[in-house]
Amino acid sequence: MNRIPLPTLFFSANRLVGHGVETLVRTVGSLKGIFCDAAAFEKLPQDAIAYEVSSYLPVPEGSIGSLYFGITRIHPHLAGNEYMMTKGHFHTKSNCAEYYWGIEGEGVLLTMDTAGKCRAELCFPGSLHYIDGRLAHRMINISEQIFSFGACWPADAGHDYQTIAETGFSARILKLNGKPCLVSLNNNKCTQLESI
Ligand code: PAN
Ligand code: ZN
């Protein structure tokens, strides 16, 4: 009798594991230049893991109609009063949207349009976030533990890191009086984000 095949991909300890899964590790040192306080950033252990992305990319990049899947785990570090975060990017193709969802810990999804307008959403286990293809997106770990989230995006989306490397996000999530706040760099306006 034939057996029904077992799946080849699994979530294990909030990582994606299985045949064909690739893991990218970004160290703290590889994020030089993205934090507001350069001196505080230099004091962090540069070899420590900032975040890891385990991805399943079953088709060549650029394949139209196909999907990629990944789980990112951001470690809890503070560069001065700025929380650890992903580099952030625009998709090269602005008609390629993405889903993010919270798995473990607590974070913030920060998006920015091409005019520099930012928006923040709290992310926690069970929260689901639709990211319009025209928006730059970055995740920030505001908890004291690993913050992990899932992502699903089109295989032809492409990643534009250059624009963010040059212009940055116009708002940051900073720890002020012990609480996460959305701080606009244009007018120094602070909006407190209620922790769940
Ligand atoms: C995610 C991100 C992942 C890491 O899979 O690539 O969370 O963030 P950075 O790519 O900004 O370093 C995604 O948004 N894919 O499109
Ligand atoms: Zn993306």
Image (cartoon, grey):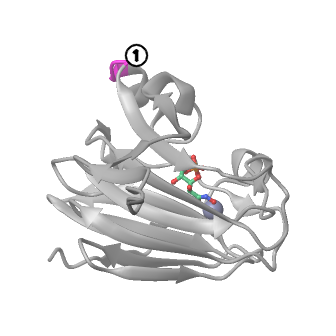
Q: Which residues are magenta?
A: 43-47
Above or below, comparing residue 17 to residue 110 in the picture: above
Q: State which quarter of the image contains the N terminus.
A: bottom left
**Residue assigned mark 1:** 47
- 44 drawn magenta: yes
Instruction: Please state which amino acid type lies under the numbered disc 1.
Output: Asp
* Residue at the image point whose x is 33% and y is 23% from the top: 44
Q: Position of residue 71 (x, y in %)?
A: 43, 53
Q: Position of residue 107 (x, y in %)?
A: 31, 63
* Residue at the image point whose x is 54% and y is 33% from the top: 31
Q: State which quarter of the image contains the C terminus.
A: bottom left
Mark 1 and ligand 1: say if the CB distance to the nearest ligand atom is below 8 Å.
Answer: no
* Residue at the image point whose x is 30% and y is 46% from the top: 81
- Mark 1 element type: loop
Q: Is residue 132 visible?
A: yes
* Residue at the image point whose x is 32% and y is 76% from the top: 122
- 175 drawn magenta: no
Above or below, comparing residue 120 to residue 79 in the picture: below
Farthest front residue? 1
Q: Quadrant of residue 51?
A: top left
Q: Position of residue 33 (x, y in %)?
A: 59, 34
Above or below, comparing residue 48 to residue 56 in the picture: above
Q: Quadrant of residue 91?
A: bottom right
